[in-house]
Amino acid sequence: MDQVFCAERASKWDLETGWVFLFYSTSSVSICFLFGVKGVLFLVVSYIIWSSEKLVVWFMIWIINGLLVYWP
């Protein structure tokens, strides 16, 4: 349920600020390290279900950043 909490918390923030991007880009490193690619894909599906379209755009940036760091 962590992704639900993150989605609800991010929706309360101003998504145009750099702080939200910093939060997602730094979190992608830990998510990819802990769960690997399959875990990240599961989080993508879960997040799309619980998020708005605007948050999906931020989440895709978050995932792409993580995959660029940890892609084998």
Image: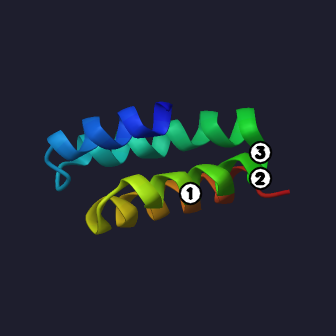
Residue 57 in which image quadrant: bottom left
Q: Measured from the top left, where is residue 27 in percent x and y? A: 50, 37
Kind of residue at badge 1: Val
On residue 68, which mark appears? none
Secondary structure at badge 2 equals: helix
Q: Which residue is mark 3?
A: 36
Separation (CA) of disc 1 from disc 2: 10 Å
Q: Which residue is mark 1?
A: 44
- Which mark is nearer the camera, 3 or 1? 1
Residue 61 against residue 34 in the figure, above or below = below
Residue 18 against residue 54 in the figure, above or below = above
Kind of residue at badge 2: Lys
Query: Nearer the N terminus, badge 1 or badge 2?
Result: 2
Q: Residues within 10 Å of mark 1 (few under 14, many from 20)?
A: some
Query: Nearer the N terminus, badge 3 or badge 1?
Result: 3
Q: Measured from the top left, where is residue 33 in percent x and y? A: 72, 36
Q: Measured from the top left, where is residue 17 in percent x and y? A: 18, 49
Kind of residue at badge 3: Gly
Residue drawn 77% across and 52% down? 38
Give the left or right position of residue 50, taking residue 69 as reference.
left
- Which mark is nearer the camera, 3 or 2? 2
Q: Which residue is mark 2?
A: 38
* Closer to the camera in the image, 28 or 6: 6
* Closer to the camera in the image, 15 or 46: 46
